[in-house]
Image (cartoon, helix red, strand yellow):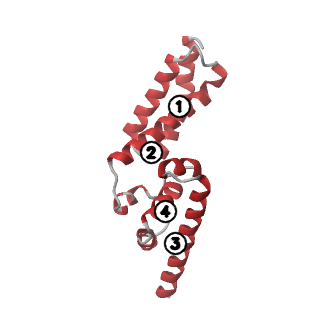
Amino acid sequence: MTDKDFNNCVDAYSDGVYRFIVKNLGHEADAQDIVQSAFEKLWVNRAKVETEKAKSYLFTIAYHQMIDHIRKDKRNNTTDNFEEVKSNVNISANGELKQILLKAINELNPTQKSLVLLKDYEGYSYQEIGEIMDLSESQVKVYLHRARLILKEKLVHLEKMRA
């Protein structure tokens, strides 16, 4: 990849990579840092990266850096209190439904709660969740399925009580 190809990549892909990262992180300054770092890695490795593969290279690098950032942030901000996480939850329903859902999630055991948050709110894959929680991929699927069944049962029960 030439210097001109690199500049063309910056012009063509910087907005898309930024939108992808900021949508997932929800924090503009961190997203800007990750995008800049991804382009820096592309610059350092420009001799090894084919111009046609630069877009996928950038998105891959940015994605992995975003995951690292999330993991680092989680280590620094570990908490069992779901109230801090709820600001990242974007449920398109009224406030009452949010409160009911938050209450049901908070009643899950810590493993189930973590699984639901990682999969449904953070968007991690089963494999990534397994790595994070030191579980096999099949254990993640089984435990998550059970947690969702419990949530469904709690939500149905709460709805019946309201009616």
Residue 77, horizontal then vertical, whole percent: 33, 50
Q: Which residue is mark 3?
A: 151
Mark 3 and mark 2 in contact? Answer it, CB < 8 Å: no
At label 2, counting other C-alpha atoms closer than 10 Å, the crowd grade (few under 14, some 14-19, many 20 or more) is: some
Mark 4 and mark 2 in contact? Answer it, CB < 8 Å: no
The residues bearing labels 3 and 4 have C-alpha atoms spaced at a distance of 15 Å
At label 1, counting other C-alpha atoms closer than 10 Å, the crowd grade (few under 14, some 14-19, many 20 or more) is: some
Q: Nearer the viewer, residue 139 or 95?
A: 139
Determine whether the residue tagged by mark 3 lies in a helix, strand or loop: helix
Q: Residue furthest right?
A: 52
Q: Which residue is mark 2?
A: 25
Q: Which residue is mark 4?
A: 91
Q: Who comes first in sequence, dot 1 or dot 3? A: 1
Residue 153, horizontal then vertical, whole percent: 54, 78
Q: Given the image, on which type of amino acid does mark 1 rest?
A: Ile
The quadrant of the picture occupied by the N terminus is top right
